[in-house]
Image: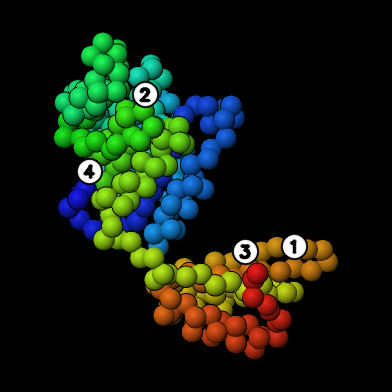
Amino acid sequence: MPGSCQPTGFGLIIIGDELLSGKRQDRHLSEVIRLLDERGLELTWARMEGDDPERITAALRETMAGKDVVFSCGGIGGTPDDRTRQCAAVAAGVELAIHPDGRRQLEEQFGAEGASQRLRMVEFPEAAELIPNPVNRVPGFTLGRHHFVPGFPNMAWPMIAWVLDSCYPHLHAVGQRIERSIVVHGARESQLTPLLEEFTDRYPDLRLSCLPRWTPPEFELELGLRGPCEQVEPVMRELQGAVSGMGFHWQPRC
């Protein structure tokens, strides 16, 4: 099991100049949210980095110092702009080395000659473990609680699913967390802020959200509660009663 401490959350790093320049649109964020949600888990944070090695290394140093499970998508190929492997090694303070099982997988897939041309793709930080790639058998790698996969969605997504199911099944919480929302008509954020602060203080295990909308000529607020099933339902009923008591009309969000 990666890491020796209980993770505190899940993070996502998406790497590639092509995303920051607009040449390609990110597809990983929404899919990783879905993969986590299927298992009763939540994404805690996400960030996007270009191919600058200093920035990638700094980002990985920061996240490796924490306790989150982190998925990193992109930059682990064999071309000069693929620098994530090197940056991960520097951030962890270890050397790069050809992974013996990675070499074997390349040889099985491409033959000895083809594998020799691709060895850079299995040059991973020391002590890294492999993440199987079901598409072309060129693996990703795990380093502690950090999991590095290619930028190609058809490879990255099943590899992330494999990590979640193989390394963190003990964290799965399907059906244990729910979200409920209501739309409050004619309300502005400032009018409900004191009430929301009160609920935030009283129920720290719940995630409370407030999304304002302006649908001329009326203002609306979408109030959401997310957390353990046994808490969300009674607290939402309490919130509904408090909103009604303030004279606002609300309805469940469809």
Q: Is residue 19 above or below residue 221?
A: above
Identity, as a three-letter code, of the amino acid under mark 1:
Trp
Depth check, mark 2 against mark 4: the one in front is 2
Q: Is residue 226 above or below residue 140?
A: below
Q: Secondary structure at mark 3?
A: strand
- Disc 2 or 1, which lies upstream in sequence? 2
Q: Which residue is mark 1?
A: 214
Q: Position of residue 246 (x, y in %)?
A: 66, 85
Q: For the point 71% across and 69% down, which residue is it? A: 220
- Occupied quadrant, residue 72: top left
Q: Position of residue 193 (x, y in %)?
A: 59, 73
- Disc 4 or 3, which lies upstream in sequence? 4
Q: Is residue 69 above or below residue 86?
A: below
- Relative depth, front residue between 108 and 235: 108
Whole-angstrom CA distance, mark 2 to mark 1, is: 46 Å
Identity, as a three-letter code, of the amino acid under mark 3:
Leu
The answer to whether residue 226 is visible is yes
Whole-angstrom CA distance, mark 2 to mark 4, is: 20 Å
Q: Which residue is mark 4?
A: 144
Whole-angstrom CA distance, mark 4 to mark 3, is: 36 Å
The answer to whether residue 59 is visible is no
Q: Which residue is mark 3?
A: 211
Q: Which residue is mark 2?
A: 77
**The residue positioned farthest toward the right in the image shown:** 217
- Disc 4 or 1, which lies upstream in sequence? 4
Q: For the point 45% across and 36% down, which residue is it? A: 154
Q: For the point 24% across and 26% down, which residue is it? A: 105
Q: Secondary structure at mark 2?
A: loop
Q: Position of residue 200 (x, y in %)?
A: 47, 74
Q: Residues within 10 Å of mark 4 (few under 14, many from 20)?
A: some
Whole-angstrom CA distance, mark 1 to mark 3, is: 10 Å
